[in-house]
Amino acid sequence: MTASRSADEARSLASAAEQHVGLVRGTRDWLQRDYARLATLERRLLDQFARAGYRPVRTPVLELSDLHERKSGAGIVAKLFEVSGAGTAGISLRPELTAGIVRAYVESGEPASLPWRASMAGPVFRFLPPGRIHDREFTQVGVELIGAGGPAADAEVIWLADWSLRALGVERPSIRIGHVGLILELLGRSGLPVAATSALIESLSEAASEGQDVRSLESALDRLAAWLGSGPADDGREASPTTDTADEPAVDRLFRHLVPDVAGRRSGAEIIGRLRRKWELGHSLHDALQNVREQVRTLADLRGPAAEVLARLDRDYAALAPASVAAIRELTVLLEQHGVDLGRVELDLGFGRGIGFYTQMIFEVSVPTPDGPLEVCGGGRYDGLARVLGSDRDDRGAGFAFGLERLYQALGASRTEADAAPPSRGYLVTTAGAPGVDRDAAALATFLRDRVDLPIVLSDLGFDEAVRYAQELGLEHLVVVEPTIEVWNLEHGDVRSVSGGELVEQLRSRLSVVRGDAL
């Protein structure tokens, strides 16, 4: 190797070393103090779920993209992080936890005892524009209740989310409840053909993923109604020789618009003709769309305190969507039975988030912050997901997930140092710079670790530095190993001299009181 080549390589290495390698946009690091608080928050949520009978499960971060494409809706599918590389086609990082949990339920060897209550926690990944609130990687913590349906199961899920928040010290979380089932029931009873209704729901799903409320559904219906009256669209395709496109009936045009590609033994004209024959004689497609559009427009404004909205539902929708109205009313009654104050509950029938995924009740929970309410939890009912994934088991399901980092942010305003990260009852063992006692300090640390279940950290820092380091780690005591052993209580500032055996007995006694063994 020549000298010039060695110099070039050295310069190249130096240049590479100087280049800054930062975080991926939309991600963040969690260092010890903040991560300890975040982990404590996750553990407290899971412990609260366990008190209601929800046991933790774990599913892979990597899943087949098809798992989420089948029913997650356009809003989620568009945000998938797909894995690239040899042998990774069709594999994605999970964008949420529910689909993986339901897949695990479907694939479990033995039929689960129903209802199946599962809790979960883990990272999820979505391709989102990085921002102050939305991250590309974040943690979800939540539950799934599978094999139970109706208002009773819905009430349990909403109550558990609210109860868990109140256990964290949030006095008055606000609950916003919608009901996708009301929209679906209106469409189902509108007089539209089943095929048209199904295709329209898919179209509305995409609209909802953008606007996340019924106003976007209203716009989709407006566009469809305007298109219906505009005459045949010139899309450049040849007309079917069996169809007179100049006089094409409205229902034919709707089917050609919603189902443009048909396959199988029958021609497109035959399929459309069969669907037309099922259309009730004399029924006007235009009138049906107009009725649905007016109903959706009214729903967009149907929002407010639970008692007020229930009265309007009974008056305006009990005859149009009786099953959904009855379910919403029963849900509010059961929430009161669970101890949920209906004064904190808002019914929002224009809340259409996830219409392609959720099938009935949907909800979100927000906590008050100095900048206004911040949504920290969302969920709903997703009946049929297990069936879509190929199961013949009970396919009813409901659940929710907290955004852990967002909850951490929301609680930050009211969190104090005392309740955010309780100090450890551990000990920092140090030589305080004294010569010839390193082995004694190591032996004492090992002696203590073998006998007590407390954090024991070994150090050779000087006294002042050791005090600061112990406080940074949240340790309550400093053990200085010199010819004698001194134990400093950093909270109270007192000190005592002990032998190794005396220290162990004191630690054991203290630990038993902490655990409640001595009570």
Image: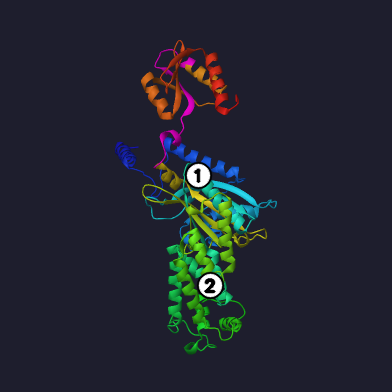
SS for callout 1: helix
Does the stretch in magenta take in 130? no
Is disc 2 surrounded by few (<14), some (14 to 19) or many (20+) residues within 10 Å?
some
| Location of residue 282 in the rendering, given as x and y in whole percent from the top left corner | 56, 86
In the image, residue 516 above or below residue 109: above
Q: How is the image coloured?
A: rainbow
Of residue 397 and residue 20, the one placed in the foreground of this image is: 397
Is disc 1 surrounded by few (<14), some (14 to 19) or many (20+) residues within 10 Å?
some
| Rendered residue at 39%/42% (across/down) | 413
Number of numbered discs on residues: 2
Residue at numbered disc 1: 166
Q: Residue furthest top?
A: 483
In the image, residue 291 above or below residue 401: below
Residue 21 placement, left or right of 80: left
Earlier in the chain: of badge 1 and badge 2, it is 1
| Location of residue 371 in the rendering, given as x and y in whole percent from the top left corner | 36, 49
**Contact between labelled residues 2 and 1, with CB atoms less than 8 Å apart:** no
Q: Is residue 89 visible?
A: no
Of residue 282 and residue 338, the one placed in the foreground of this image is: 338
Indicate the amino acid at tag 1. Answer: Arg
Q: CA distance from mark 1 to mark 2?
A: 42 Å
SS for callout 2: helix
Indicate the amino acid at tag 2. Answer: Ala
Residue 111 placement, left or right of 321: right
* Disc number for residue 428: none
Please provide the residue range marked out in magenta. 413-440
Residue depth check, mark 1 versus mark 2: number of the one nearer the observer = 1
Instruction: Determine the image quadrant of residue 14.
Output: top left
| Location of residue 214 in the rendering, given as x and y in whole percent from the top left corner | 46, 66
Residue at numbered disc 2: 199
Task: For the N terminus, give its image quadrant.
Answer: top left
Q: Residue furthest right?
A: 110
